[in-house]
Amino acid sequence: MQERQTKQKSIIYDALKTLDHPTATEVYGYIHEFYPSVSRATVFRVLNGFAASSRALELKVAGSDVRYDYNTHPHYHVHCRECGKVADIQAEALSVIEKGVPKEVDGFSVERFSVEFFGICPECKGMKA
Amino acid sequence: MQERQTKQKSIIYDALKTLDHPTATEVYGYIHEFYPSVSRATVFRVLNGFAASSRALELKVAGSDVRYDYNTHPHYHVHCRECGKVADIQAEALSVIEKGVPKEVDGFSVERFSVEFFGICPECKGMKA
DNA sequence: TCCTTAATGGGATTGAATATCATTTATAGT
DNA sequence: ACTATAAATGATATTCAATCCCATTAAGGA
């Protein structure tokens, strides 16, 4: 038998669409209000599963916890260096990069790359005052 | 008074040069053999400090723990998707990217970007057999 | 050598993420 | 519909990197 559709999965997927690049903990906090019976473990498991099956992207960066993005279309992200918040960013396709990269390095097989942008978000910018 | 030079710092820096893109825990494990009195907290603190003062790079990625690189010259990395190991990679300067990227997005100020490569290392490739 | 204070040791603590496992429940087959 | 099977869940315990706390140590300027 293959993967099953469960209420929890759709609850979590809805939360993922509602929230803005949330962490697993943020998703849990959000749905816990409405569905207290959904366990933390399930949230982590399901989000992991979404990422594994490409139903969501896993954004793993610097200091901040892993974040999830239901938008699996190719796009880029800016990460706030203060609070870890993430926003989408429009940039030209970066296929340019592939050209300069060897397929094999020191025995390593290079399969893919990722580009992440960093900066500071409006809220944290305000904090500085 | 400014920063002080301590024995711990030079021990940790030496370990950093000896080991290959180690995590803080790997550094601790390594020096603990020879200098059991150096505490875990110090290793984390000092490596953090190195990164903050640009004496080392902090490599933060996917699943794997934060790794440190004493080589602060501009270069890129391949991360093994299985074990998290890191190797240096030579690629052309990617200044190309900057052109396509806005300085301001949704109130975010974009300050910098990073490019990371992923693949599989020789050891993990062997495992598959 | 003395003083100031940055830095350390080490034990306690945090918190995301994972493991375990008995129980629940989605779904394929009848 | 009904049942059997195993995927998925809930609850709790556990792991482990990373941080915190604070009394003690020691770097380095005077």
Image (cartoon, coloured by chain):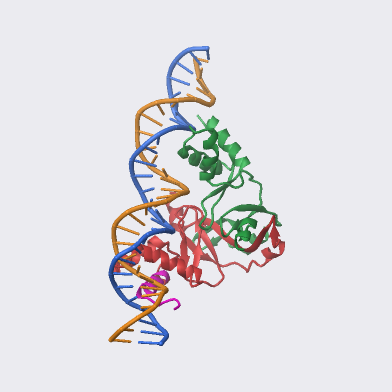
Chain colours: A green, B red, C orange, D blue
Image: C20 above or below B127: above
Name which residue lies at 62% across and 56% down: A123
The residue sitting at 62% across, 40% down in the picture is: A18
Is A116 magenta? The answer is no
Please state the horizontal and vertical placement of residue D5, each as a whole percent of the image: 43, 24
Using the rendered image of the protein, determine whether residue A99 is visible from the camera's viewpoint: no
Q: Is residue B11 magenta?
A: yes
Q: Position of residue B39 (x, y in %)?
A: 33, 65
Residue at 63% x, 60% y is A125
* Closer to the camera in the image, A117 or D20: D20
Residue nearer the viewer, B47 or B22: B47
| Span highlighted in magenta in the image | B1-16
Q: Nearer the viewer, residue B68 or A40?
A: A40
Left or right, A91 with respect to D13, comes to right
Question: x and y percent of residue B19 in the render?
Answer: 40, 67
For the question of whether residue A15 can be seen, the reply is yes
How many dots with numbers? 0
**Picture quarter with the N terminus of chain B:** bottom left
Indicate the position of residue B45 as horizontal and vertical percent values.
42, 66
Magenta stretch secondary structure, dominant:
helix
Above or below for B114 versus D26: above
In the image: residue A100, left or right of residue B43: right
Q: Looking at the image, is B76 positioned above or below residue A23?
A: below
Quadrant of the image occupied by residue A71:
top right
